[in-house]
Image (spheres, rainbow, N blue to C red):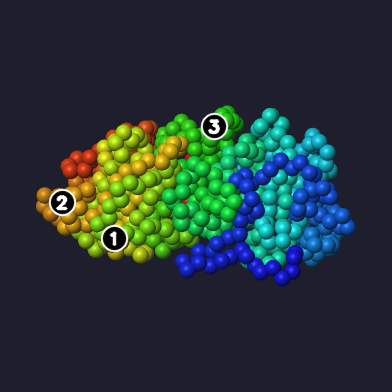
Amino acid sequence: MAPGVPALLLLLTGAGTPHRLLHEEAVAPMPWGVAESGRPTSATAPAPRFEPTETVESAVSEGNRFRIHFTRQGPNAVPLADEDGNGVPDFVELVGRTYERVATFYTGLGFRLPPDDATTPGDNGGDGRFDVYLVDFALRADGAFRMETCLDGTTRCTGYMLQENDFTGYGYPSDQEAVEILASHEFFHAVQAAYRPDLGGIASEGTAVWATERFEPALDDLEGFSHYYLELPDRSLLTDPSGPAVGFSYGAGLFFQFAGERFGDALLVALLEESVRQPTIRWPLLLDTCLRRDFASSFDAAFTQFTAWNLGTGSRATPGYGYARGEGYAPLVTTASALPTLLTSMRVGGASSRTFEVAGSTSFVTASFEPEPGTDLAALSLMVAAVTDDAVLRVVQVSGPEPLRAQVAAEDATRVVVAVVDGRPQGLGRYGELCIAATGQDAGCAPVLPPPSDGGTDAGTEDAGTVDAGTGDAGSLDAGSVDAGKPQEPIDDPQDPSGSDGGCQAAGGPLSGAFIALLLGRSLRRRSRPGPGLM
């Protein structure tokens, strides 16, 4: 390891969420490339590679699936401790054991493993086993998958792994945790290549971050990357970033974490299987196909619910609402706005949201979003959430096809969050007028809607279309309302206002369109992480 380089891995933010160094160097939107200059044992290979003066040895893992290549001297040397005295450094054995655990875990979820490389032209590491090379990344990154060949044209591809040789200066709590994170992340890239290696940076890095979290939730990789997404929810998941912005692809792991918790591991397996059946289709459309065919849902319904879950991260994580471990994720970054607020030409892109935050402590806050004339209203939603600094109290959501207007009771809320969501899996941005106003404010674009006739009906009643966080029947399903802490019945067609996400119904009264009321209550139990097939 290069001396004198400061540890870069954990940079603590004010919110206490760790920021993590990207595993691969941020030089391209893809986490791998076809290796054309030889493996790291070759003098023509790009860095990191072994030095010509280093003697490279190898050891086979106990499960016989991996061959670990290492050296005992030079800048690429591994730690030499060998407590069992069997002649193989303990670090090398740790790497072999961990990759075996990871491979067994992924096959248990239903994923394919990469094909062997016995027929790879040239250097294949000595046999058909999957090869892992321990080399010094010098704090530029800490691992990478290198693809070499595809057995079926552009699918069923294989390659090898590069991994940091000693993790000196990286700031991981232990070698074991470092190896678990790298093995689970980088080997999942090899799993992806066993299907189709060109899903794009967001899908490849995002699902790899999800895979690490799924392998061992106690690892803080997703927690460390979550800020890359939650700081920029207005950035579309449809476009792969590059260069310094590539961290967003890692942060997008939060979307796949949502998908796994909401629909189960089977959805992620189905996504990769579908990528082989439709090798030219982009991942959002592949996911939409899987959701409609196998889960009676859709991409836009899922993305809209994902946006709602993101309200409950960081200090606003609330028992019974959204993510099982939302308190460990970065807080959602919103745009602070005054009351009333009027944006006459606001743009929202596909698979993204525009999120604003205004003051609460008023009877109601109302928001409206009216797209420009002639705009396709498909997959547009508006949500208004009453929140405090440490909880989400209630969320009201409305979807087209008419101009979007919603209000939320906000007397007990210190803040109100308003989000305009475009859940399409493809398409350009759409423009419209956003207006946010509070009780008693003269804002014709978003007038405060009349309260129920008795003036004091609970938000949990059928009229209001929401559930009161403090009532004892918070877990029950009323017309126009759902319990956000429990699995919701997905939908067949997200454009049908009678079947919006969560099984909500078209609301009567002054608000038209489809309502979803997502409630959480402090008294609700924290939802557990669902296993395969649940939700």
The tag on residue 281 is 3
Helix, strand or loop at label 1? It is loop
Type of the residue with mark 2:
Pro
Quadrant in the picture for residue 172: bottom right
Q: CA distance from mark 2 to mark 1?
A: 23 Å
Vertical order, 282 against 519 (above or below)? above
Q: CA distance from mark 1 to mark 3?
A: 43 Å
Indicate the position of residue 205 as horizontal and vertical percent values: 58, 47
Q: Would you say 512 lies left or right of 248 here? A: left
Which residue is nearer to you in this view: 491 or 347? 347
* Residue 338 numbered tag: 1
Numbered disc in front, either 1 or 3:
1
Residue 283 visible, this orientation: yes
**What x and y, as percent, mark residue 132?**
75, 50
SS type, badge 3: loop
Q: Is residue 406 above or below residue 362?
A: above
